[in-house]
Amino acid sequence: MRFFHLSDLHIGKQFYGYSLLKDQEWILHQVLELAKERKPDAILISGDIYDKSVPAAEAVAVLDRFLTELTQLEPRIPVMMISGNHDSPERLSFASGILEHQQVYLAGLPPVRPEEFIRKVTLEDEWGKVDFWLLPYVKPGYVKQLFAEEGAETCQDAVWKLLERESVDTTRRNVILTHQFYTAGGVNPKQSESEIVVVGGLDQVDTGCLAGFEYAALGHIHRPQSMGRPSVRYCGTPLKFSVSEWNQEKSLTEVELKEKGSQPEIILHPLQPLHDVKILRGNLEEILQQAEEVRKTEGSVDEDYVSVTLTDEQEPYQPKERLEAVFPNILEVRMDNSRTRQEWLPEEVQPAADPEEMFAGFFLQMQGREMDEEEQQILREVFSHVREGQDL
């Protein structure tokens, strides 16, 4: 059984104000061409299909064209999709009954009532049946009614309880599509700047709940990586969505399952973006000169998305305008020199002042007035006790 694992398409995303729709169509076309060549038995998309819960019509059209072309391939390739935290479960599930006739299987919401269970799609190969479990993004509020008595306060509670109530036949091969913030034995995944992080850890789920699955097709984290074992894998995004991802290699994950008990084989197919993400650093004239040499050699300007950090000690004349003439897709222009570093130097690393004077300055900033005589006396007594090591 061979299948593709994709996630976090974020169709319709804006990147520093630039629409990525053309970039996304470009990359989805590569997936389509790989599907024609490799002929997988299934394609899994593990959430965050769209970038917004109410996607623009143009974004919906991009997905529609991609699915239409996939369903026209022969032999037919089943497509399985779940919602992520960016998706509207209800909108993503629209027309799911009709799409199922085209072997496009959607799961927008997890089970929310006692009579509902995780959607399962079963395929078969020479080694027998493979059960694919489609578990969309889960928040405790989604399953509040389902676990009213025992409660589910965190994402960990919700996911574990949902899986425990399923009759997973571990004598067969099982694959799960799931979109959560998974950790492995307390180790967090490596992240990028383009991800949404929930402070406090309430969204974390330990991968121990996935022990019964031969492969876990994870979504949510944008950097490709495995968690705990090779077969519990974030495939990452097919495109770079932040400057922090400039040196990541984006790829399509292909997985091959053989007989029960064997380790899945994972193959990565590199994906070539329409526009790459680059970081340039140096003084303005050097960067412009290098761009001019590239233009003369290749006969065109560099249309990649570019983040520029200028190191000129003197403020250059109209740097952004001059850079845009040779880099039409400028993301940002930053300055990094002795002056800017001094401006950003935290106050606490400046030469130390008298502690009482520092607090007096802080009081003035917070209260908008000087301390009166009584407050000054209290402050002096406090610092006196501190210096003498006495209890207050």
Image (cartoon, rainbow, N blue to C red):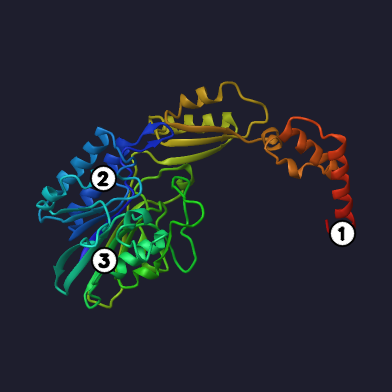
- Where disc 1 sits, the SS reads loop
| Numbered mark located on residue 389 in the image | 1
**Residue type at numbered disc 2:** Leu
Q: CA distance from mark 1 to mark 2?
A: 67 Å
**Residue type at numbered disc 3:** Val
Residue position marked by numbered label 3 in the rendering: 175
Vertical placement of 163 versus 286: above or below?
A: below
Q: Percent x, y for residue 259?
A: 22, 76
- Where disc 2 sits, the SS reads helix
Q: Comparing marks 1 and 2, which lies closer to the viewer?
A: 1
Vertical placement of 76 versus 228: above or below?
A: above
**Residue type at numbered disc 1:** Gly
Question: How many numbered discs sit on the rendered protein?
Answer: 3
Residue situated in front as seen by the camera: 174 or 274? 174
Q: CA distance from mark 3 to mark 1?
A: 62 Å
Task: Determine whether label 2 and label 3 are within 8 Å by CB.
Answer: no
